[in-house]
Structures are given as C-alpha cells and as structure tokens.
Image: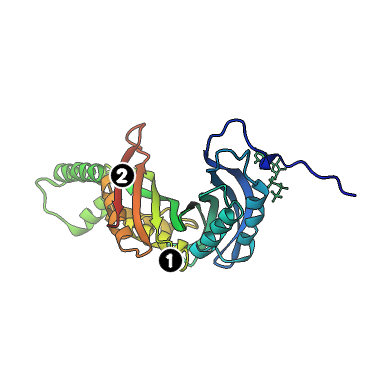
C-alpha cells in the first residue's frame, strides 16, 4: 500500500498575502528554432492571487515546459504554454510568465572572400499572459563597430595640413600625390573606432506567426552597416575599413538608424533601443536611447 504523501502546497497559510510572482528560475530547456535544437534557460512562474493558499504547484509548470522541446518556438506556442500554466493553477493565479534565455548561433558570410564563420547572439524572450492577453518582448544584443565622425573630420584636417606643407610651391604630379596618399607620412592621422553594442528591447506582436530572429538581426545589422565579422582575410578587412569609412557614427547616429529600421518591421509594436559605444577616446562609454510605441 502506498503511503499518502503530505501536500504542503495545498495547505492554507497563516500569512494571507497574495504574491506577485512565484516560480522557478534557470530551468534547462531545449528549444526548437528554425528546426534546430537550441539550449535555453527558462524562468517560469505565476502570480499567487489566492492569499490563503500556501504555495503554487511548481511541478505543473515544470512539466508544461516539455511542450517547448517538440514544437518550433512561436508566439502561439508560448501563448498555449502560458494558458496551460494558468489552467494548472485555476483558483490560484491570474497571471503567468515565462522568460527564455538562449544564444542564437548564426553563420555569417565574410564581406568579400568566400569564407564564413559563426556569430553568437544573446537573446531573451519575456512572455506574460493576463486576461488571455499575451505580452511578448524580445531582447537582442548586437555587436558592431563605430568610427567617430568627429575624429574622422579632425584626422582629415591634419592630412590636408600635411598636404599643404608637403606640396606647397611645387607643381603637383599625380604619381607623387598617389605615393604620398599611400604613405603614413601623408596620411598622418587616423580616426578612432570602437567595439559597440546595440541593445534592442522589442515589444512583439503576439499574433505574429513566427519569431523571425535572423531576419530581425539582419535588418538591424544592415541599418548599422558595420556589424562585427567572423572569418576575415585581408580583402574582408579592407571591405570592413570601407564600411566603417562610409558609416561614420556617433552613438546618436546609430540609435537613429536603428529607430528608423525597427519602424519598418511589422512584428515590432514598440521598442527601446540603447546603443553603447565603448569609447577608445575615453575610459567611459557614449550611450544613446530611443523609444517608440505603436499607438
Ligand atoms: N510551492 C513550492 N514548492 C516547492 C518549493 N521548493 C520546492 N518545492 C517542491 O516542488 C515540488 C512539486 O510541487 P507540486 O507541484 O505541488 O507537486 P505535487 O503536489 O506532487 O503535484 P500536484 O499533485 O500536481 O500538485 C514539491 O515537492 C515541493 O516541495 C517552494 O518554495 N514552493
């Protein structure tokens, strides 16, 4: 005969206070994204609105997460999962939430050479369900390079001054000027560049059929023009130098480019863009933030 197991969660509490969120953090879960298995961590929880109830039923949330293993990750899948969280906590909870943290590994082609390599993108999805309204947010961090436009202009001025000094009072010969342009004595100054990061916090349309992660990332990287590279040969490095020269950016410029680009994405219904330029001129960062919400 099996002994009856005590069930503490079903007792009443001596401190009848509702709780905003109760659940589990850091659960290992496999996701399916673009048909591939992706390792993730999940935080799963519900509100405990029934003040007298001692506890929630954590195992019910944990077991419901199994749905993530088999089906492609989508807004509809998260909606169904959060409904299941609430169904398994009838009379106890009105709100359910799920956070998924994972890294997308995308193959990135080189700029010129036929090579490619892998790039990691840290992603975080926050899903919350209340009154059957699903609220979805996606956090993405995109590393890129930014060359300071002010520094570029100052460097060009120094080059002009050196040109005046070197070529004053003598007839210009194209071959001499060409050689001068190719020498460190001619191009005396270079602008400073920095590794930069765009932190995108996107509110997503919960009725969107899919999470178009790689399309979103491509769109944002195209807007910047200087995403960090993977496999690089000299031809690629030269193309990157050109991309940097053609996309000189203050942090304000980068934030505005991303703002404009994200407005073009139908599935994005609001965002906060934070760009961080880890200055090489200063020991501190230059930061710009832009927000937008669809009316
Ligand atoms: N509510 C709650 N459960 C916890 C906590 N820490 C560990 N648990 C354990 O989570 C386990 C699963 O809880 P339940 O989902 O209530 O398990 P169960 O009663 O076997 O499952 P049901 O019959 O579906 O309610 C229990 O063994 C709890 O002891 C906690 O802080 N709060």
Q: Looking at the image, which residue is at 45% across and 57% down?
A: 134
Tell me the quarter of the picture where residue 188 sits: top left
| Mark 2 CB lies closer than 8 A to ligand 1 | no
Circle 1 packing at 10 Å, graded few (<14), some (14-19), many (20+), is some
Q: Looking at the image, which residue is at 14% across and 44% down?
A: 164
Residue 4 tag number? none
Tell me the quarter of the picture where residue 158 sits: top left
Q: Measured from the top left, where is residue 151 in percent x and y?
A: 25, 42
Q: Which residue is mark 1?
A: 208
Query: Which residue is farthest left?
Result: 169
Nearer to the camera, 69 or 10: 10
Q: Measured from the top left, where is residue 165 in percent x and y?
A: 15, 41
Q: Looking at the image, which residue is at 90% across and 49% down?
A: 1
Q: Secondary structure at mark 2?
A: strand
Q: Measured from the top left, where is residue 101 in percent x and y?
A: 54, 50
Tell me the quarter of the picture where residue 185 sits: top left
- For ligand 1, which image quadrant applies? top right
Nearer to the camera, 245 or 261: 261
Nearer to the camera, 95 or 105: 95
Q: Which residue is mark 2?
A: 289
Q: Earlier in the sequence, mark 1 or mark 2?
A: 1
Would residue 183 be visible to someone looking at this image?
Answer: no
């Amino acid at each position: 005969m099996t002994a009856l197991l005590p069930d503490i969660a079903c007792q009443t509490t001596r401190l009848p206070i509702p709780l905003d969120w109760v659940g589990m953090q850091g659960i290992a879960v496999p996701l399916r994204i673009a048909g591939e298995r992706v390792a993730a961590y999940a935080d799963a929880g519900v509100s405990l609105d029934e003040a007298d109830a001692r506890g929630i039923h954590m195992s019910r949330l944990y077991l419901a997460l199994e749905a993530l293993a088999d089906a492609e990750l989508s807004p509809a899948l998260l909606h169904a999962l959060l409904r299941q969280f609430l169904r398994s906590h009838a009379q106890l909870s009105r709100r359910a939430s799920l956070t998924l943290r994972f890294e997308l590994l995308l193959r990135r082609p080189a700029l010129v050479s036929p090579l490619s390599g892998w790039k990691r993108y840290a992603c975080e999805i926050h899903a919350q369900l209340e009154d059957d309204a699903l609220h979805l947010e996606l956090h993405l961090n995109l590393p890129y390079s930014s060359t300071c436009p002010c520094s570029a202009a100052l460097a060009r001025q120094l080059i002009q001054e050196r040109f005046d000094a070197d070529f004053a009072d003598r007839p210009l010969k194209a071959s001499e000027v060409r050689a001068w342009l190719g020498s460190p004595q001619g191009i005396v100054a270079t602008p400073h560049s920095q590794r930069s990061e765009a932190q995108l916090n996107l509110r997503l349309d919960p009725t969107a059929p899919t999470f178009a992660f790689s399309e979103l990332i491509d769109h944002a990287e195209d807007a910047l023009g200087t995403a960090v590279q993977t496999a690089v040969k000299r031809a690629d490095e030269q193309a990157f130098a050109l991309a940097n020269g053609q996309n000189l950016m203050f942090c304000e410029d980068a934030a505005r480019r991303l703002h404009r680009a994200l407005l073009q994405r139908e599935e994005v219904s609001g965002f906060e863009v934070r760009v961080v330029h880890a200055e090489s001129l200063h020991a501190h960062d230059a930061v710009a933030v832009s927000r937008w919400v669809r009316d």
